[in-house]
Amino acid sequence: MTPILLQPRDIAVAALLIVLDGALSVALRFGIHRQLFIAAARMVVQLVLIGFVLRAVFALASPWATAGVILLMMAVAAREVAARPERQLQRFGNHVVGAIAVSFATGLACILALTTALRPSPWYDPRYAIPLAGIVLGSVLNSASLALDSLLGGVVRERGAIEARLALGATIGQATAPLVRSSIRRGLLPIINQMSAAGLVTLPGIMTGQVLAGLDPLEAAKYQILLMFLLSGGSGLAAVAVVFLAIRRLTDDRQRLRLDRLRDT
Amino acid sequence: MRLRLAGLRSVLAGPFDIEVPAGGCVAITGPSGSGKSLLLRMVADLDPHEGEALLDGIACSAMPAPEWRGRVAYVAAETGWWADDVAAHFTDLAAARALADEMGLKAELLDGPLLRLSTGERQRVALMRTLLNHPSVLLLDEPTGALDETATARVEAVLARTMAAGTAILLVTHNPAQAARMAARRYVMDAGKLQRA
């Protein structure tokens, strides 16, 4: 089966739906048509641009260009993880923590998939490596930012409880354990939701895309399952990493809680 | 000397050189924000500091921090809780019930949710939690700040008995009468410096 190739006219027809939304916003004074059109235009420009970039990188087939694109994607994701929480660690701590967690979790998940399940040749073939890194990063970003936000907010709220335990002779690990657990849990919820709902509530994006592109539904499902494992596994690792790295920075060798290492908000 | 502070200081307060003998009490009064709580937190090693605190001659820095804090126990003015049930904060509930009675608390409070406790009740339960740990030194920050006279007298009686068993107390209080009742030696804190009163 060959995929049905889209013509600009086909896309323009779909865009009419957005125009309809905009018209409704004007007519009923929702006041969001401007934002809607800007977002739609951004989306088109970004995706077309990335299409050209990927075409160029695929044609280059250079491991350096591939690595460069993936590193750039990781840097953007790490920045998002760092910026999301209301509270910030001193000295770009959020950025450092985000970068380490994101690159470690994504790198592990992608290399595992490329060297075992997918095995393109060479294993760093950009056609596989870049989209794979992208989808894993999207999920990792979500989990890591939720876990970090939950930890940094919670540590300020729970300060009294944590220090009360410390003052009773608890280790810093015992005193922060409930907060660490709830923050990691918070980071894992979206992927648990996503896996539980997959196929019932929503047909996941990858599978939809592959079915539309002509692949057999069962083959598409297998791909989706592989990807779900990769991005859920990666997200779990990222949530754990981000929480442990951040709590390390908020404690010291005398097992104190060091909220002075949070930036003033 | 049970507790000795040798040049204990931070950028905000100190240096402090105080001695508290076993079974003795030293009281510190002074205006809010003068550094009283900072001093107690440094002694408990909850805040970074220079200088040294010594328990029976052993330096804080020579001891694992949790062990130090278990023996030199800080009770904050604002109580902290890590579970919804009061009982979850105690390991020995039978001992807690006996002590609750001495503190003038109804024993059934220990079986209920934390939310049912008033500020004054929380303050006493938090103190009980620490007392049942049998520390060598108590660092008390306004231990009766939220209590009426009757409850204050009960708490002071329990503290006096604890001192008789050898525990040293470093007491921060706004109440000069309490300082006079409990402490043989009194200091006034002003702008991070201690003066003999």
Image (spheres, rainbow, N blue to C red):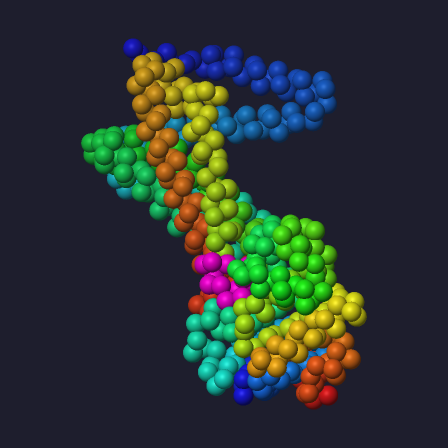
Q: Where residue B138 sits in the image (x, y, percent)?
A: 59, 75
Q: Where B54 falls versus A248 (above or below)? A: below
Q: Is residue A72 left or right of residue B91?
A: left
Q: Where residue A245 sits in the image (x, y, percent)?
A: 43, 54
Magenta segment boundaries in residue numbering: A162-175
Q: Where A95 falls versus B166 (above or below)? A: above
In the rendered image, which quarter contains the C terminus of chain A?
A: bottom right
Q: Which residue is at a point 42% across and 29% down the rendered structure image? A: A195
Q: Is residue B184 left or right of residue B166?
A: right
Secondary structure character of the magenta stretch overall = helix
Q: Where residue A26 sits in the image (x, y, percent)?
A: 70, 20
- Residue B159 seen in this snapshot: yes
In the rendered image, which quarter contains the N terminus of chain A?
A: top left
Nearer to me, A176 or B194: A176
**Total marks placed:** 0
Q: Which residue is at a point 70% across and 51% down the rendered structure image? A: B116
Q: Is residue B60 within the magenta segment?
A: no
Q: Which residue is at a point 54% across and 77% down the rendered structure image? A: B136
Nearer to me, A26 or B25: B25
Q: Where B82 falls versus B12 (above or below)? A: above
Q: Where B37 falls versus A134 (above or below)? A: below
Please identify the quarter of the rendering in which residue B14 is found. bottom right
Q: Which residue is at a point 41% across and 44% down the rendered structure image? A: A238
Q: Is residue B84 left or right of residue A239?
A: right
Please identify the quarter of the rendering in which residue B86 is found. bottom right
Nearer to me, B11 or B36: B36
Q: Is residue A169 within the magenta segment?
A: yes
Q: Is residue B31 left or right of residue A3?
A: right
Q: Where residue A7 sits in the image (x, y, percent)?
A: 42, 13
Nearer to me, A93 or B27: B27
